[in-house]
Amino acid sequence: MADKRLQVFHTVAKMLSFTRAAEVLHMTQPAVTFQIRQLEEQFNTRLFDRTHNRVMLTTAGERVYQYAQRILELYDELEGCVKEMTGEEGAVLTIGASTTVAEYMLPVLLGKFKLTHPEIGLSLKVSNSESIVAMVADNAIDLAIVEATVQNRHLLVEICRHDQLVVIAPPGHDLCKQPSVTADQLARYPFICREEGSGTRGVVEAYLEEYLAANQCLNVCLELGSPETIKGAVEASLGISILSEATISKELALGSLCAVPLNPPLTRPFSFVRQRQKFRHAATEKLLEFARDYCRQEAS
């Protein structure tokens, strides 16, 4: 394992935030601060300036960050190389997924993968798309699948499949009688949306920015943290929402929700995200190829 202090420093330096670094590393903020202080004592210099609620690297901190990046990349490559040389495939792969993907796509995909590759251990981290992408950038996970657009030139993004989003409403709602729904029609009703950082929310906001009339705005009545809680709120007639078509098959079969396509239609990609320069274990390649095949079969 690479020096924990160096890993913590690298994460804080990349995000320029002790709070966000603590979230990504699954540590408390005091623990992050303690690791940074230890490193500063080792080098006998300050690595960060903390003034006016802002975190900035000092000149020494900039230099340590450059070396830390190289050291952590080399260590990861060394670890992977030794494992491949010794034939060790029992190492656990850490997979990251945004909430929608984790709840409705990964259980079947990973279950089938484990049947054919029982020797490969898997660990799953679930969060919203923004947090998962940050974990990939920080080398905290080996491979991620998210439903948001990823704009980071240091990461490789490969589309797995396309997903359609639809308007959901309780049975008997006015919109259930419509063949399709426009952005302006959405603004007439209380709307339930996902939390900040959610891939679904980002896609919906971009769609509405393009198609909602300039004098219109959504009547957001609730912000909720998962598709399941949103479906429950819509079933209780608290508002309407927009969700992935893949998340509502059970509710449509039971008749507890209705789904109406948007006009124009709204689709988004589910994408694999991984480090561009990171050494990839043979096990990671096996999982990636298996996931590609799974997505192709689902699309056909």
Image (cartoon, rainbow, N blue to C red):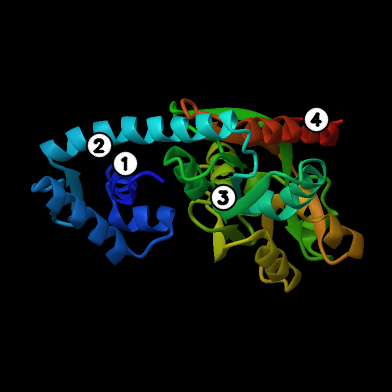
User: What residue is pinned by disc 2?
Assistant: 65
Number of other residues with Cα within 10 Å of mark 3, as a class: few under 14, some 14 to 19, many 20 or more: some
Of 169 and 128, which appears nearest the observer?
Answer: 128
Image side of residue 180 versus residue 254, left or right: left
Image side of residue 108 versus residue 284, left or right: right
Of label 4 and label 3, which has the lower sequence position?
3
* Type of amino acid under label 1: Lys
Q: For the point 65% across and 49% down, which residue is it?
A: 122
Q: Secondary structure at mark 4?
A: helix
Q: Secondary structure at mark 1?
A: helix
* Alpha carbon distance from label 3 to label 1: 25 Å
* Type of amino acid under label 3: Arg
Name the spot of residue 224 as percent of width and height, x first.
58, 64
User: What residue is pinned by disc 1?
Assistant: 14
Name the spot of residue 157 as percent of width and height, x first.
57, 29
Closer mark to the observer between disc 4 and disc 3:
4
Closer mark to the observer between disc 3 and disc 1:
1
Are the two marked residues, 3 and 1, in contact with CB atoms closer than 8 angstroms? no
Q: For the point 56% across and 60% down, which residue is it?
A: 219
User: What residue is pinned by disc 3?
Assistant: 201
User: What residue is pinned by disc 4?
Assistant: 296
Name the spot of residue 200 as percent of width and height, x first.
60, 48
* Type of amino acid under label 4: Arg
Of label 4 and label 1, which has the lower sequence position?
1
Residue 185 in view (yes/no): no
Closer mark to the observer between disc 4 and disc 2:
2
Of label 2 and label 3, which has the lower sequence position?
2
* Alpha carbon distance from label 2 to label 3: 33 Å
